[in-house]
Amino acid sequence: MIPEPAGASSHAWAAIAYRPGQRSRDNDRFGYPSCMGKQEARGAGSGGEARGGGGVSLREFAADVRAGLSKQGQRELPSKYFYDEVGSALFEAISVLPEYGLTRADERIVRAHADEIVSRVPSPAIVAELGSGSGRKPRWILGSLGRREPAVYYPIDISPAALARCEWELSRIPSVRIIGMLNPYLEGLKEVASRRKDGQRILVLFLGSTIGNFDRPVGEQFLGQVRSALLPGDALLLGTDLEKPIPQMLAAYDDPVGVTAAFNLNLLARINRELGGDFDLRCWRHAARWDERQRRIEMHLVSQQRQTVRIPRAGVEVSFRQDETIWTENSHKYTPDLVASMAQRAGFRCEAQWSDEEWPFAESFLIAISPDPSR
Ligand code: AVJ
């Protein structure tokens, strides 16, 4: 692991720019928390609405739980709800498991190629990151950019706690100013773009293979929307987990210590905590599956017996058969060529790709091309 920097003793908190009242359906759909560092956000946010952990409104959580569990056929829950305070801590633990090399590979590649990545973006440049994460990965890029010119870094995240943490982590990089954007990804990116000064290029970071949680067509559509927020010549650094032998992928999502199982089960515990549900976690078990056709890992929660669950604050009562599952996450896996062609259809040209020896993972450096292909 890469050592943490020395703790900052005196630190001025950077301003968090927040634009209330800008949520649209699409943005909600992509108002996706980053893969790390979501922490408690109770009481923060817009309009004084009740919030659960992770900065998402309780009403929205209740509606999504109700919709997902009321589905006929395969029941499901959205993976964005993994990241409350407990879930975020469990994800941090996952990211140091020997079986789960994804996060460390991503960081190694960014670190090894930070200077080259920065040199491919003409001066002056600003950096926007979709998901503020723990702040570990952008550090190397910002360090390199700060040595070249004074720069601004805009982490975009819907969790105030995650933004605060990221700002703390990165506060000591010379010549880099941090402005946290408390927004869904696309809204935040549009806001950053509107602040761009003449001649500035934007480098967008979308790391951690978060794109893999979207269905493939939705992920491609998302890239197209990122492209639409940019100008020709702007850059996107996209991190994607690559296909590897099936046993290795399965172990990454079903580790022997059971951290990933706890991460998955915590979704039910969160429903109990925040929506008054009565899931008995002992009657559920974690399962990870490889879908050969979709080329993705799926995580499910398996009902180990016939049972009925009540969730008063979501207004649902659901019965499960023995072995029936709730589908909680997709993690699509890619090949470098697939990433390049997907990026091309979304209006980018893939100028460089780097991967890791130890854990197949790709960082793709994409340039926005004209004309804007958004339809
Ligand atoms: C950080 C969203 C990419 O899909 O691999 C880790 C989350 N899920 N273990 C992933 C996760 C189960 C992770 N992402």
Image: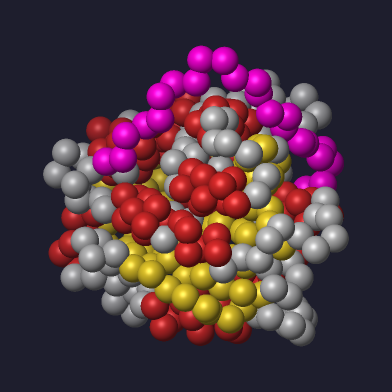
Q: Main secondary structure of the magenta part?
A: loop
Q: Residue at x 52, y 78 (%)?
A: 351
Magenta region includes residue 9: yes
Q: Measured from the top left, where is residue 163 in percent x and y? A: 60, 34
Numbered label tally = 0
Q: Quadrant of residue 150?
A: top right
Region of the chain picked out in magenta, as a range: 1-25
- Outermost residue on the top side: it is 9
Q: Please say if 21 is above or below 168.
A: below
Q: Would you say 204 lies left or right of 27 here? A: left
Nearest to the observer: residue 25 or residue 211: 211
Nearest to the observer: residue 287 or residue 196: 196
Image quadrant holding the N terminus, namely top left
Q: Residue at x 19, y 70 (%)?
A: 245
Q: Measured from the top left, where is residue 25 in percent x and y? A: 74, 56
Q: Please say if 48 is above or below 68.
A: above
Q: Would you say 109 lies left or right of 83 here? A: left
The colour mode here is secondary structure
Q: Measured from the top left, where is residue 363 in percent x and y? A: 43, 66
Nearest to the observer: residue 170 or residue 283: 170
Q: Residue at x 21, y 39 (%)?
A: 258
Q: Would you say 146 lies left or right of 82 here? A: right
Q: Residue at x 68, y 80 (%)?
A: 369
Report whether residue 349 is seen: yes
